[in-house]
Amino acid sequence: MDRVIEKKKFTTKKVALIAAGTLVLILVLYNLLFAEHSSKLNVDSERVTLGQVQEGNFQEFIAIDGSVDPLKSFYLDITEGGRVEKIYTDDGRMVEKGDTILKLSNTTLQIDFMTRETQLYDLMNERQNSEITMKQDLIRKENDLAEIEYNLALAERKYERNKMLIAEKVISREEFEAARDEYNYLKKRKMLAERSVKQDAKLMEDRLKQLDESIRRMEANIGMARSTLNNLYVTAPFTGQLSTLKAEVGESKAPGENIGQIDDLNGYKVKANIDEHYISRVYPGLTGNFDFNGKTYKVAIAKVFPEVQNNTFQVDLEFAEGTPEGIRRGQTLQVKLNLNDGGKAVLLPRGGFYQSTGGNWVFVVNPNGDYAEKRNIKLGRQNPNHYEVLDGLQPGDKVVLSSYDSYGDIDRLELK
């Protein structure tokens, strides 16, 4: 009789498969829970730059390049155009106030001046002739008035005498009336003659006043023309150094054209251009300093020019403690301009890492110095030397400052 053989539940093969699967599962869980997943990169420690985080006084400043200029300069601009006839001095020479620098010639202006002078002489002659003519007419009318007054006096005596005679009936009525009519006629003629003399005198006075006013205006006009001719002589407005002179004999110059500059050597200032990013933070009174001949000198902003050109605006700085000895026009100074009064902060030295991370994270070196790990940070203000650390770093931490461009997504640097 056949016997049923019972099938085994766990064969050797099944046990081996289960054991292998369990081992794989354990390895996966271990890898997920305990293994290190960060990417690493071996880096030569001599090829990286390290910097230490420290606590100190954070002074927010910007570095600007300034050019030394005279405290006061005068630009020589041509008022009236013309041809350069003569040059009296050269570049770099000292000139006194009023010294002639060059002479221009302008035929048109000279002819115009002569024409105005001729017009003035004609006007003066017209005034003189008008005065003579009007005075002669006035004298003639005064003579007529004198004759009328003489005849009136005779007529008046005759009329008064005839009044007595007519009362005595010595003369006829007709003779009396004739004497009376002649007397009244001469009285009216005298009144009219006096009025005519007064009117002519007033007209003469008014006419002469008009001519005098015309002469005065013409003289003022000629004075302006003479001043215009004087402008053909370019003179020094004050004592200083003629730093540039852009003119050659025979050269034509247009009105308003600049031909040079005179510098007052009694003082200097520093002129600098600043990035427009700082225009809201720069104002008169801000101080800065620069090094010159082994010493540090202080400057202060005296004037801000708000006009932006080529993404920069201009400022004038004055020496706060007097002009440094030996400084000269045109020298370039590297000025550290302070944007605030400073204060305590955690400081991180500047480095190339910022271009790669934007200041959001850095590689921080462990205490033993054998590796550096990625750490998120937060930076605030900055100056040419340091960043202000707001979070993520403590004084004493060492940070890789050099560029991270070649590290990609690496989380840890092994420093060899």
Image (spheres, grey):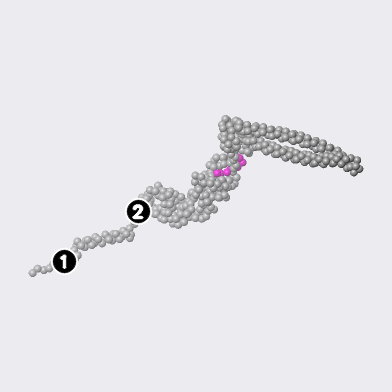
Quarter location, residue 244: top right
Could you tell whether 141 is left or right of 365 in the image? right
Counting residues from the start of the chain, the first of labels 2 and 1 encountered is 1
The residue most toward the bottom is 1
The numbered mark at residue 130 is none
The residue most toward the left is 1
Circle 1: residue type: Lys
- Residues 32 and 242: in front is 242
Circle 2: residue type: Ser
Residue 367 falls within the magenta-colored stretch: no
Which residue is denoted by mark 1 in the rendering? 7
- Residues 341 and 279: in front is 279
Q: Marks 2/1: CA distance?
A: 51 Å
Which residue is denoted by mark 2 in the rendering? 39
Residue 268 falls within the magenta-colored stretch: yes
Quarter location, residue 198: top right
Residue 74, above or below 251: below
Could you tell whether 352 is left or right of 178 in the image? left
- Residue at the location (8% across, 69% down)? 1
Residue 24: x %, y % from top left: 26, 59
Mark 1: few, some, or many residues within 10 Å (few <14, many ≥20)? few
Residue 355, above or below 258: below
Question: Please, what secondary structure does the residue beneath circle 2 have?
Answer: loop
Residue 205: x %, y % from top left: 74, 39
Q: Main SS of the magenta segment?
A: strand
Magenta region, residue range: 264-271
- Residues 168 and 259: in front is 168
- Residue at the location (59% across, 42% down)? 71
Question: Please, what secondary structure does the residue beneath circle 1 have?
Answer: loop
Question: Quick check: can you spot residue 88?
Answer: no
- Residue at the location (42% across, 54% down)? 360
